[in-house]
């Protein structure tokens, strides 16, 4: 595993007890990897795409803890990598 992968894995294990810190961390993840897209049925959704499962799991957990939002997780595998998508 790369150094940046190890750092991400270590950081996602840390949970700030204060809600405002959780919101700040969630905002950073959403800003860095989030985007709005239109689904096949015409509805819009916000999704977060990650190559590492740790950050996708952290985003999922923060959304549940801070906003009590139910989300979907999609995993697309190719021969070279996996892409984890948290759909809001």
Image: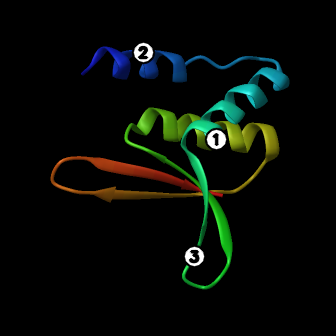
Determine the CA span between mark 3 and mark 2: 33 Å
Q: Considering the image in quadrants, where does the C terminus appear?
A: bottom right
In this rendering, position of residue 53 left or right of residue 86: left
Badge 3 or badge 2: first in the primary sequence: 2
Q: Considering the image in quadrants, where does the N terminus appear?
A: top left
In this rendering, position of residue 15 left or right of residue 52: right
- Residue beneath label 2, please? 7
Res. 30 mark? 1
x, y percent for residue 15 = 66, 20
Give the SS element for disc 3. Answer: loop
**Callouts 3 and 2 close, C-beta under 8 Å:** no
Determine the CA span between mark 1 and mark 3: 19 Å
Determine the CA span between mark 1 and mark 2: 19 Å
Give neighbour class at mark 3: few <14, some 14-19, many 20+ (Cα, 10 Å).
few
Give the SS element for disc 2. Answer: helix
* Closest to the observer, 53 or 80: 80
x, y percent for residue 71 = 64, 57
Residue 2 position (above or below residue 42): above
Badge 1 or badge 3: first in the primary sequence: 1
* Closest to the observer, 76 or 13: 76
* Quarter-of-image position of residue 50: top left
**Callouts 1 and 2 close, C-beta under 8 Å:** no
In this rendering, position of residue 51 left or right of residue 80: right
Which residue: 34% across, 59% down?
76
- Residue beneath label 3, please? 39
* Closest to the observer, 33 or 78: 33
């Amino acid at each position: 595993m790369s150094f940046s992968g190890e750092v991400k894995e270590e950081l996602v294990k840390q949970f700030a007890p204060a809600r405002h810190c959780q919101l700040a961390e969630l905002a950073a993840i959403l800003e860095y990897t989030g985007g709005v897209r239109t689904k096949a049925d015409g509805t819009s959704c916000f999704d977060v795409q990650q190559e590492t499962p740790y950050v996708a799991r952290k985003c999922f957990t923060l959304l549940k803890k801070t906003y009590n939002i139910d989300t979907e997780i999609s995993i697309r595998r190719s021969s070279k990598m996996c892409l984890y998508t948290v759909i809001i």
